[in-house]
Image (tube, grey):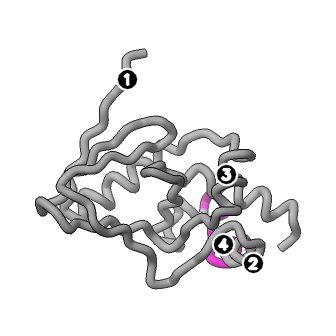
Amino acid sequence: MEQGKNREVFASLCQFLWMQGHLIPLIYDLNHEVYSDQGITLPALKALEATGLISVAPAGYVKKGFGQHTRLFYFGRPTKIRFPEEAGNQLDLGHVLLTDKGKAQAVANCDVQSNQRFYEYVIEKWFQQGLVMSSILRKQ
């Protein structure tokens, strides 16, 4: 894939970034249209991986060690998650992580809008996993 196309795909990937201490792309199902409609496919991700911006794991990534509550942010929108257990909880992060190079690139060059359809997709996915979410709405 050419460099310009990689730049487009990476910019598209940025709409799937959540913040929890650092930027985390939540790419759960590569065949789901919420991703493919935005050009995020396995070949596109493999091309980004070859540039050193991301790492892709077919088995997926998991973040462990959560207490009963945590908070993640999607484009500044806080979403509180309540896990079922008091301690030792984990969160499925999907199949993609940003490398240090990718994190720097995302902070420097990602000027994208949030994707409400994707946000709702993630909330539904977490709900199906038995997590309880609440979102704090900011006054306008």
| Residue to which mark 3 is pinned | 106
10 Å crowding of disc 2: few (<14), some (14-19), many (20+): few
Q: Whole-Å distance between the Cαs marked 4 and 3? A: 15 Å
In terms of secondary structure, where does tag 1 sit? Answer: loop
Q: From this view, report whether residue 137 is shown above or below residue 45.
A: above
Which residue is at a point 32% across and 46% down the rendered structure image?
A: 71
The image quarter containing residue 38 is bottom right
Region of the chain picked out in magenta, as a range: 37-45
Q: From this view, report whether residue 71 is shown above or below residue 59.
A: above
The image quarter containing residue 129 is bottom left
Label drawn at residue 94: none
In terms of secondary structure, where does tag 3 sit? Answer: helix
- Of pointers 2 and 3, the one earlier in the residue sequence: 2
- Report if residue 124 lies within the magenta region: no
Q: Is residue 74 left or right of residue 100?
A: left
- Of pointers 4 and 3, the one earlier in the residue sequence: 4
Q: Horizontal and vertical percent for residue 95?
A: 50, 74
In terms of secondary structure, where does tag 2 sit? Answer: helix
| Residue to which mark 4 is pinned | 45
Label drawn at residue 50: 2
